[in-house]
Image (cartoon, rainbow, N blue to C red):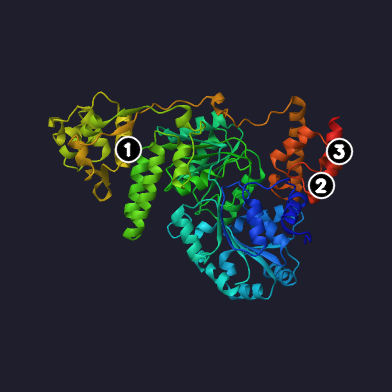
Amino acid sequence: MTHPSSGSTRALDVLETVFGYPAFRGQQAEIIEHVAQGGDALVLMPTGGGKSLCYQIPALLRDGVGVVISPLIALMQDQVDALAEVGVRAAFLNSTQTFEESSRIERQLRDGELDLVYVAPERLMTPRCLELLQASRIALFAIDEAHCVSQWGHDFRPEYIKLSVLHERFPQVPRIALTATADQQTRDEIAHRLQLDDALQFVSSFDRPNIRYQIVEKANGRKQLLDFIQGEHAGDAGIVYCLSRKKVEETADFLNASGITALPYHAGMEYAQRSANQARFLREEGIVMTATIAFGMGIDKPDVRFVAHLDLPKSIEGYYQETGRAGRDGGPANAWMAYGLQDVVQQRRMIAESEADETFKRVLGVKLDAMLGLCETLACRRVHLLDYFGQGSERCGNCDTCLSPPISFDGTVAVQKLLSTVYRVDQRFAGGHVIEVLRGIETERIQQWRHDQLSTFGIGADKSEAEWRAILRQVIALGLIAVDYESYSALKLTDAARPVLRGAQAVQLRQYQKPVKTKRDSGKQKGYEESTLSAEEQALFDKLRWWRVETARKNNVPAYVIFHDATLREIAKARPRSIDDLRGVTGVGEKKLETYGEQIVALIAELG
């Protein structure tokens, strides 16, 4: 596919005629022009920000084939199908193909018959593939999910480190590395390891204003999740993240038993079953995927309305990456998490017991502390989140701490009582026992250890067990108490506890709030209402969605590959009576107009 006109006019022409969009967003135009002219780039752009156009359009503008390095073998077929729908000649090379299929793609690549080819990094590094690329005309290399090169990151893939070979073997070919998530340290590491030190860096705003962030006190996590889905997202597509494979399967079973269609996904499942579940999630409406973090990278499904966490993520990068899979279409979406004391203890234990060296453990500890800070903040969650990525912002008015500001209180006396009790039980007991001593509960074990004789026995009787657990969680998060995992999770005082015990340092805490059941109307998101359709427009929109489902099923592609909801909504409002009327609707390029134009116009005529 060639576009002979010049400069940025050519790029805009491709955007309109091929992809059906009237204008570039944010830094897209600048990035595309830079790469199309042969420059290297490192691009940080949030999920849903339009990263893929930043390499797809330069690949179409330059001579040769754009080579996209992606770790997402399971999604390559969908990406290629989506490009075929808009008339781009795309293919992939990966381990799922037969020798004959691979040979055919390799021949097309050599003969210049492709615009884009997707390759997994392991495949790229083979002598056969490198020789093939050297025998072909390459327009550019796009390194997608570039944060995978970071050894400190949450998605490290060793094969990514070898990608510096591209600079050595193909010094004249421009390279563009892209990711949705990277703090400054990760950014520097990407540039260094991929030999992109001289590349222009384009850092978009990390803000996703359509996502509402909500973190609730964990009481009964699964029940709270069910209330949240039934109250705010009945019938919506969503993702639920859990830490363990067992919890993934139990949560899927629980949701199915409660009338919500849920599918499990984790690395321990058979590949065929995992792929089948992913395909159903992408192709069908309203499915909830319960998964470990093995699921989600590169998921292009635009209408995921919520991402929920039943366990605390290891880092803000991980949390941001996972929650960013909601609301890619710009519509209102929720990032919901249930978080409690056990999450803090569990994550700290995982770091302590990991086989990593002390430097790496320290980095993991710092990242976890930042994640805990986000959970415990009394301020706007979005401000806290963006600040982590070095971006200033104002209160958003669309997160839980803005909509229902938490009450803070001077918790110094309560914390002193807790610290004193830990000290008086000789720092040998876990949280449950310490709380029973504080509350003056006369159990057999407490009497056996004569802890009912301690001066702190019963000094915290004015607070419930849940309140003390919330205080203990915050005290651990603040680093005043450590948990000794080699000694039955015994609580130990840290050096930081001393000034608090002496009264030399005050402690502000969040006041415990009893979990409340979500009400249906609380899902209305201020400032991000779905565009309202009249009854007539809604009927047409529903009909268009059914047509899309049938068309997608016939073509064996996800529904959103045909058209996004936003495009169907615009068609329902515009009610085009001819092919010409349909041209110019956002998301309708020339190839889609040619393929589906007559069907859509006929369907609208049917409704009168």
Q: Is residue 332 left or right of residue 427?
A: right
**Which label lies toward us, 1 or 2?**
2
What's the residue at 33%, 49% (across, down)?
A: 349
Drawn side of residue 16 relative to residue 332, left or right = right
Disc 3 crowd rating (10 Å Cα; few below 14, some 14-19, many 20+) is: some
User: Which secondary structure, mark 3?
Assistant: helix
Q: Residue at image x 22%, y 41%? A: 497
Residue 401 image position (x, y, % from top left) = 45, 31
Quarter of the image with the C terminus in it: top right
Q: Residues within 10 Å of mark 2 (few under 14, many from 20)?
A: many
Quadrant placement of the N terminus: bottom right
Image-based side of 546 in relation to 295, left or right: right
Of the two numbered discs 1 and 2 on the same chain, state the one appearing first in sequence. Answer: 1
Question: On screen, 137 above or below 369?
Answer: below
Q: Decide: is 155 above or below 459.
A: below
Q: Identify the residue at image location x=61%, y=35%.
A: 236
- The disc label shown at residue 10, or none: none
One can see residue 354 in this view = no
Secondary structure beneath dot 2 equals: helix
- Residue nearest the observer in this picture, 519 or 328: 328
Q: Residues within 10 Å of mark 1 (few under 14, many from 20)?
A: many
80 relative to 496, above or below:
below
Q: Nearer the viewer, residue 579 or 463?
A: 579
Q: Please state the horizontal and vertical placement of residue 165, each as a whole percent of the image.
A: 55, 71
Amino acid of disc 2: Leu
The residue under label 2 is: 593
Pointer 1 residue: 473
Is label 2 in contact with label 3 (beta carbons under 8 Å)? no
Residue receiving disc 3: 602
Name the image quarter holding residue 151. Answer: bottom left
**Label 1 to label 3: alpha-carbon separation:** 61 Å
- Quadrant of residue 153 within the rendered picture: bottom left
